[in-house]
Amino acid sequence: MFDRIRKIAQTRLHVPPKEFRMILLASVLVMIGAMAFVWPNVRMVKLGYEYQALLKEQRELLRESNLLLLEKSSLESLDRVHALAKEKLGLQPPENGQIVTVFLK
């Protein structure tokens, strides 16, 4: 491929091989320099998008955590536990003769 480009440069542009190599080397160095200048900006934009996605995920997880804490506190409510014990399990408050007190030394 480089031979073909070199032949085109020699026939159409009338550039000697030594000058062609220098021009090719200079253009490659300019392209590498341009890429080195642009790459950090591209990387910064990509990191910015990743950061925004992580912030969105964090907000969603915090919202879900708050909802789960609310659900936990409602399930642990003593009024709810008392109602479930009466209705579903049929438990009754103890009568006076059913209470036994244990003393520990």
Image: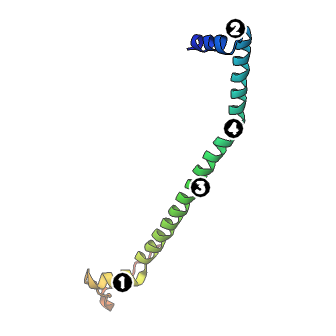
Specify which label sits upstream in the sequence, 4 or 2: 2
Residue 17's disc is 2
Residue 99: where, in percent of width, then height?
Answer: 34, 85
Q: Which residue is drawn at 42% across and 75% down?
A: 76
Instruction: Identify the residue position indicated by label 4 in the image.
Output: 38
Q: Look at the numbered disc 1 and give the secondary structure of its residue.
A: helix
Q: Look at the numbered disc 4 and give the secondary structure of its residue.
A: helix
Q: Which residue is drawn at 31% across and 81% down?
A: 85
Instruction: Identify the residue position indicated by label 3 in the image.
Output: 52
Q: Measure the C-alpha gap from mark 4 to mark 3.
A: 22 Å
Q: Measure the C-alpha gap from mark 4 to mark 2.
A: 31 Å
Mark toward the viewer: 3 or 1: 3
The vertical placement of 65 against 53, above or below, is below
Judging depth in this view, the residue of 98 and 28 nearest the camera is 28
Q: Measure the C-alpha gap from mark 3 to mark 1.
A: 46 Å
Q: Quadrant location of residue 95?
A: bottom left
Specify which label sits upstream in the sequence, 3 or 1: 3
Instruction: Identify the residue position indicated by label 1 in the image.
Output: 82
Q: Quadrant location of residue 94?
A: bottom left
For the view shown, which residue lies furthest in the front direction? 12
Mark toward the viewer: 4 or 2: 2
Q: Residue at x 59, y 51 (%)?
A: 49
Residue 62's disc is none
Mark toward the viewer: 3 or 2: 2
Structural crowding at the residue carrying mark 1, measured as other residues with C-alpha within 10 Å and reported as few (<14), some (14–19) or many (≥20):
few
Residue 102: where, in percent of width, then height?
Answer: 40, 78
Q: Which amino acid, mark 1?
A: His
Q: Which amino acid, mark 3?
A: Gln
Residue 33: where, in percent of width, then height?
Answer: 73, 29
Residue 83: where, in percent of width, then height?
Answer: 34, 85
